[in-house]
Every structure is written in structure tokens, then in C-alpha cells.
């Protein structure tokens, strides 16, 4: 079998030291001064400390300017099947009111391999993937609360990805508000983000228990910290070990207006440890942050991926997907 392009990339600094050590001590807090306000205590005793990404390090390209199945809508969330080496990206469907989504499967060089429509689903901010043998099961929002681009899911859907097929959906956590999820392919966990009492909260579960419908005992449960930066646009999140990472920022025509940030949160406490601006893909036209995911290569390098949408020109209706990654682990 030919080797995937992502596996053939030259390993960057710390690539051989990025193998996880079970039971590693909780990473020390970085920097001084409060970056966030309003952080509440977390219930995170079920998650031991683990290595974490240095989000201040440079980002590297996986691919740029690739079109998904739906040409006129920007990419949203994405996730990797770390067992079967697959990549999935979600976006809105062409010619619909906004809540109908499409999941595209891409090669690691960005070529379209397949797609699947999921109607009346929501916005697609984040999604997860669960490998089951040779199959990839998608986790994402469903049962949108409206029929526009502002609509959000009210339950989680789990279904087998079948190119061109109709999803056979099993639903979980029905009756939720603004719910999404993300998966940790290394520690086999799933994070759920949803509105609880007017504020966004994160809950973390063993992936196997979630697939069995057991959401009774979260490993962690904490409110999303309030950013000290004004005008923040939340654009995605993912988890690895004891850390949760978020991406925020808006799209701009001028690369001088970059305002996209990556943030690392300690899930054992709910506290922010670091926040850093990212200039990944800063030369892209109408660069907009869209989604995050974790992937671990066959040779053991663990990567934090950042997604960005772009255009060929400001006025062009076509939208393109771009993926970048960081690969320096601490601890």
C-alpha cells in the first residue's frame, strides 16, 4: 500500500519525543496574569494530566485551497479517523436554507473521495469520528432548531459514513440546545459542548460509553471560560488528554486584520493555561478560522490541526478548505 502524504512529511521538532506517556504529571500553568474572566470550578477528577501542545510554535501546511463537495459554502468542523486514516469535513449544502449539511471525505492531500448529506442538522461547528473496524462513524449535531444558517443542533447523531448514502442515524442527548462534539483519537474520549442554562459548558466522556448511550458520568464538566478579548467569534474546538483547545476569530479580506487565536484549557480545573494568536495561512484571501482536530501519524507524531476557509478572490462565490497543524508537545 502506498504511504499517505501526511505520513511522508518530514518530522518537525520533538517528533520522536511526542509519544504519550501514560499517567504523565499535569502540565504546569504557563505565563502570568489572567487571560480569561469568569472561570468556574470544573469537575475534572476523572481525567489525569497529560502532555499538551505548545500553541505558540509555528504551524505547517497539510493542504491549501481545496474545494469540498459543496462549492459555495465554507468548511466548518472536521475530524480524523485515526485508525483507518481518513479525514472528514462538514459544510452547508449548496442551494438550501442553511441547516442542511454535507460531510465530505478527503484524502490527506485534499482530494475529494466521497460525501454524504445530513439534512436539518445545524451549523457544523465541530464533529467527531469513531472508528469501528474498517468503518468510520460520524458524530455530529442533528435536529436543528431552525432552517437558516443561524440554526443549531438539539441532539447528537451517530451514523456510519457511506459515500452517497442516506444516514442511518442514532440520536443521543435529545432536547439539548446548541450541541456539538469533538473526539480525542489518542485517549478515546469525546467532548460535548452545549448550552446549559444560558451558558456554554463542556462535558467529556469515554467514547465507548458514549457510543453505548451512557452519558451518566462525565469525566469532566466545566463552563466555557469567558474570553477577555472583545468581539470573539467561536470557531471550533478539540481535545487531547487533559487539555481542550479552542479556535476563535473572524474572516477578513485584509491579512493585516488577523485576529484568530488558539487557546488551551486545562480540563481538570476548567482554567485557561495559554492563549496565542495564530498566523497560519495568513496569506489566504478572506481567511476565516474554521474547526480543529487532533491526529496522530503512524510514526507517532501527534498534531493539532487548525482549519481555515478561503476564497480565490473576495467576490468569488467558491469557497476553499485549508488545513494546518502544530506538532510540538510538552510533557
Image (cartoon, helix red, strand yellow):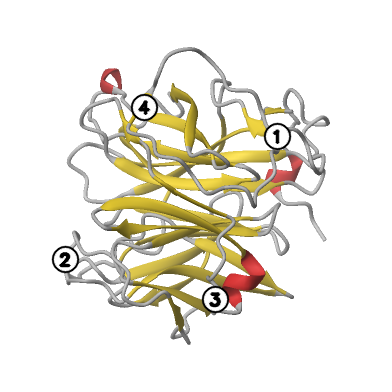
Query: Farthest residue in the top direction?
Result: 32
Q: Nearer the viewer, mark 1 or mark 3?
A: 1
Nearer to me, 297 or 254: 297
Numbered mark located on residue 161 in the image: 3
* Other-residue count near label 1 (Cα within 10 Å), few / some / many at <14 / 14–19 / ≥20: many
**Count of residue discs:** 4
Q: Nearer the viewer, mark 2 or mark 4?
A: 4
Mark nearer the N terminus (2 vs 3): 2
- The correct choice, above or below, for 140 with respect to 295 in the image is below
* Other-residue count near label 4 (Cα within 10 Å), few / some / many at <14 / 14–19 / ≥20: some
Secondary structure category for the residue under label 4: strand
Residue 171 visible in the shown view: yes
Q: In the image, what residue occupies the spot 41% across and 38% down?
A: 247
Mark nearer the N terminus (3 vs 4): 4
Measure the alpha-carbon separation of dots 2 and 4.
32 Å
Disc 2 to disc 4: CB gap under 8 Å: no
Name the residue that disc number 2 marks: 148
The x, y position of residue 65, in whole percent, is: 43, 43
Q: Nearer the viewer, mark 3 or mark 4?
A: 4
Secondary structure category for the residue under label 1: loop
Dividing the picture into quadrants, the one containing residue 304 is top right
Quadrant (top left, top right, bottom left, bottom right) of the N terminus: bottom right
The x, y position of residue 238, in whole percent, is: 51, 47
Numbered mark located on residue 290 in the image: none
Name the residue that disc number 1 marks: 51
Amino acid at each position: 500500500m502506498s504511504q499517505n502524504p501526511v505520513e511522508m512529511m518530514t518530522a518537525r521538532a520533538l517528533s520522536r519525543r511526542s509519544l504519550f506517556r501514560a499517567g504523565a504529571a499535569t502540565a504546569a500553568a504557563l505565563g502570568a496574569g489572567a487571560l480569561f474572566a469568569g472561570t468556574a470550578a470544573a469537575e475534572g477528577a476523572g481525567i489525569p494530566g497529560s502532555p499538551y501542545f505548545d500553541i505558540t510554535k509555528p504551524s505547517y501546511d497539510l493542504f491549501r485551497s481545496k474545494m469540498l463537495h459543496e462549492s459555495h459554502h465554507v468548511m466548518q468542523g472536521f475530524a480524523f479517523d485515526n485508525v483507518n486514516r481518513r479525514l472528514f469535513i462538514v459544510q452547508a449544502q449548496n442551494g438550501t436554507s442553511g441547516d442542511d449539511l454535507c460531510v465530505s471525505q478527503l484524502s490527506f492531500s485534499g482530494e475529494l473521495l466521497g460525501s454524504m448529506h445530513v439534512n436539518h442538522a445545524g451549523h457544523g461547528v465541530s464533529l467527531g469520528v469513531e472508528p469501528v473496524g474498517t468503518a468510520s462513524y460520524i458524530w455530529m449535531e442533528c435536529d436543528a432548531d431552525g432552517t437558516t444558517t443561524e440554526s443549531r443542533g438539539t441532539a447528537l447523531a451517530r451514523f456510519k459514513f457511506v459515500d452517497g448514502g442516506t444516514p442511518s442515524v442514532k440520536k443521543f442527548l435529545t432536547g439539548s440546545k446548541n450541541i456539538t462534539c469533538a473526539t480525542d483519537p489518542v485517549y478515546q474520549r469525546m467532548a460535548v459542548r452545549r448550552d446549559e442554562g444560558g451558558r456554554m459548558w463542556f462535558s467529556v466522556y469515554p467514547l465507548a460509553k458514549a457510543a453505548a448511550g451512557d452519558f451518566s458520568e462525565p469525566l469532566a464538566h466545566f463552563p466555557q471560560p469567558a474570553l477577555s478579548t472583545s468581539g470573539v467569534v467561536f470557531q471550533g474546538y478539540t481535545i487531547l488528554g487533559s487539555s481542550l483547545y479552542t479556535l476563535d476569530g473572524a474572516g477578513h479580506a485584509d491579512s493585516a486584520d488577523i485576529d484568530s487565536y488558539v487557546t488551551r484549557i486545562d480540563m481538570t480545573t476548567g482554567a485557561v493555561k495559554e492563549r496565542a494568536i495564530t498566523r497560519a495561512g495568513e496569506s489566504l484571501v478572506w481567511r476565516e478560522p474554521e474547526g480543529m482536530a487532533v491526529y496522530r501519524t503512524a510514526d507517532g507524531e501527534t498534531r493539532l490541526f487548525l482549519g481555515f476557509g478561503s476564497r480565490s478572490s473576495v467576490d468569488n462565490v467558491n469557497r476553499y478548505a485549508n488545513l494546518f497543524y502544530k506538532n510540538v508537545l510538552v510533557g
